[in-house]
Amino acid sequence: MKTETVLLFLIVISALFAACGSSDETAQRGTAGGAQLPGTSFTTNQDTLVASMSTQYKPATRSTPGSGDNAEVAFTVQIGAYTQPHHALQAQQLAKTRFTTYLVFNQYEPSLKLYRVSIGKFETREEASRIMRHIMFSYPKEYVECWLNTVAK
């Protein structure tokens, strides 16, 4: 019985050393890129990913507060910007029923991938600002924010 125990002990120790030796060989060989080790039934994969994020802003066609009136441009009041065309059409149709005395535009901006819905074509910034304040006052929940944009005459 003592001989069987010693024999079993030697088998366990030799198996343990064999397993440790093979892992050392694997580390020394380097199995990157999906190489399969001889005598194994699995593959290993190692890859490194380096990622970075870059944001670029394109200059918008919106008028800035300091820009003055120009004979070549007119001003509009933008009431919304939408990524989905059906949302922009709904906003345009609602604006046409609410603001019957003004032109209502639905213009696609490809660089921003947005549909801009705008009202009017005003000669001066002051007139456009007055209409914008009136719109925001009359419909405070629907038009929380509006913008002034410039368009060619």
Image: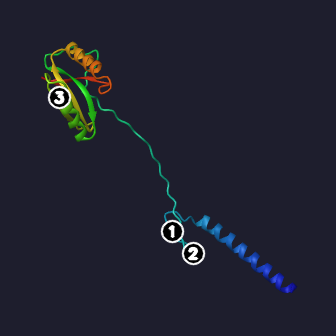
Please give the name of the residue rendered at 25% of the width and 38% of the height, measured from the top-left corner.
87
Front tag of 1 and 2? 2
Q: Secondary structure at mark 2?
A: loop
**Above or below: residue 142 compared with residue 133:** below
User: What is the number of callouts on the image?
Assistant: 3
Label 2 Cα crowd, 10 Å radius (few <14 / some 14-19 / many 20+): few
Q: CA distance from mark 1 to mark 3?
A: 68 Å
Front tag of 1 and 3? 3
Question: Tag 2 or tag 1, which sits nearer the N-term?
Answer: 1
- Looking at the image, residue 48 sits to the left or right of residue 67; the answer is right
Quick check: marks 1 and 3 in contact, CB under 8 Å? Answer: no
The numbered mark at residue 97 is 3
Q: Amino acid at mark 1?
A: Ala
Q: Amino acid at mark 3?
A: Thr
Q: Secondary structure at mark 1?
A: loop
Question: Tag 2 or tag 3, which sits nearer the N-term?
Answer: 2
Residue 5: quarter of image: bottom right
Q: Amino acid at mark 2?
A: Thr
